[in-house]
Image (cartoon, rainbow, N blue to C red):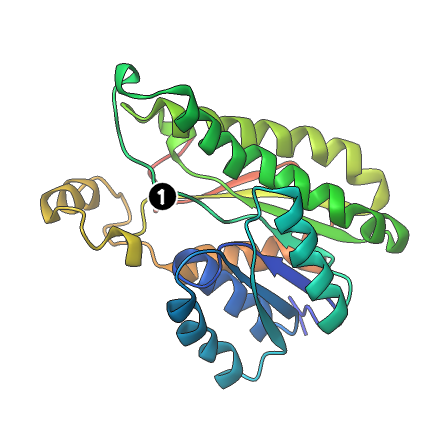
Amino acid sequence: MPFSLKNHVAIVTGSSTGLGHAIALALGKAGAKVAVNYFNNQARAERNFAAFHDAGIESILVRADVTTEEGVEKLFRETEAKLGKPDILVPNATCEQPLKPIEEYDWAFHQAMLDFFVKSPYLLTRRGLAHMKAQRWGRIINITSEVFHRAVAPFSAYVAAKGGQIGWSRSMSRELAPFGITVNTVAPGWIPVERHEKVPQQEKDEYRALIPANRWGTPEDVAYAVLYFASEEASFVTGQTLCVNGGMTPW
């Protein structure tokens, strides 16, 4: 079967809701065992985790802060004990992303962005790399954003961190290619999910009017792009960024 992930183990961070939830479900339905990760709102995470049982996916739910070495170690330790050693990593966890002019940011906020989008992928990859190198197969798929390509403003802290994430991924793709490990990024456009519930409708309408494809993207649109990069069929594709945004960045 094409795009089968049978006999593989995936970690998807920030996967109790939103895009991460859809990504983890897609990988699981393709045959992977999946570690679902969250850090806040345990009740919501446990409620949404039921979807994995309903789909018959072998999976676990792990509370861990993946911006810390301790949290990453906990996530891997529980995954290895219950599912096996992971060879598909999808760093997806994020934090609040307010648009502010540079004068209103402080360095602590910039650091938080870097912790989620550069430090966390680094920690996850470093922890999982020995197994991937030993079996000469692995997939690292970072969830970044169209904001880097579109130079969205006033959004400098988030855009800078996402740019760093893309640059890190491109460099790692060349470093790890000889070991059969691919590193790619998926860059979604704005796809409203649970955390966007309080965004004013006018803002949503203004963005929606810009989409050439003339529809909103869905979490599943992003999930299937990740599934492709995770598959054996994408074994000769690495160092790439796939924008999933209905034609917002045709360059």
Q: Quadrant of residue 158?
A: top left
Query: In the figure, 29 relative to 142: above or below?
Result: below
Relative side of 209 to 189, left or right: left
Q: Is residue 83 visible?
A: no
Query: In the figure, 156 relative to 136: above or below?
Result: above
Q: Is residue 92 visible?
A: yes
Relative side of 122 to 162, left or right: right
Depth check, front residue: 217 or 46: 46
The residue that mark 1 highlights is 189
Residue at left offset 41%, top offset 72%: 48
Work out which residue is located at the far front of the displayed protein and give it.
70
Depth check, front residue: 129 or 75: 75
Estimate the x, y position of residue 6 in percent, counting from the top left: 71, 73
Q: Name the image quarter holding the N terminus.
A: bottom right
Residue at left offset 60%, top offset 42%: 68
Q: Quadrant of residue 218?
A: bottom left
Query: In the figure, 27 relative to 177: above or below?
Result: below
The kind of residue tagged 1 is Gly
Relative side of 195 to 232, left or right: left
Depth check, front residue: 180 or 32: 32
Work out which residue is located at the far top of the displayed protein and give it.
103
Estimate the x, y position of residue 28 in percent, counting from the top left: 59, 71
Q: Mark 1: few, some, or many residues within 10 Å (few <14, many ≥20)? A: many
Q: Quadrant of residue 215?
A: bottom left
SS at mark 1 in the image: loop
Q: Name the image quarter holding the C terminus.
A: top left
Depth check, front residue: 71 or 27: 71
Estimate the x, y position of residue 164 in percent, counting from the top left: 54, 26
Residue at left offset 71%, top offset 36%: 173
Relative side of 96 to 174, left or right: left
Query: In the figure, 56 relative to 241: above or below?
Result: below
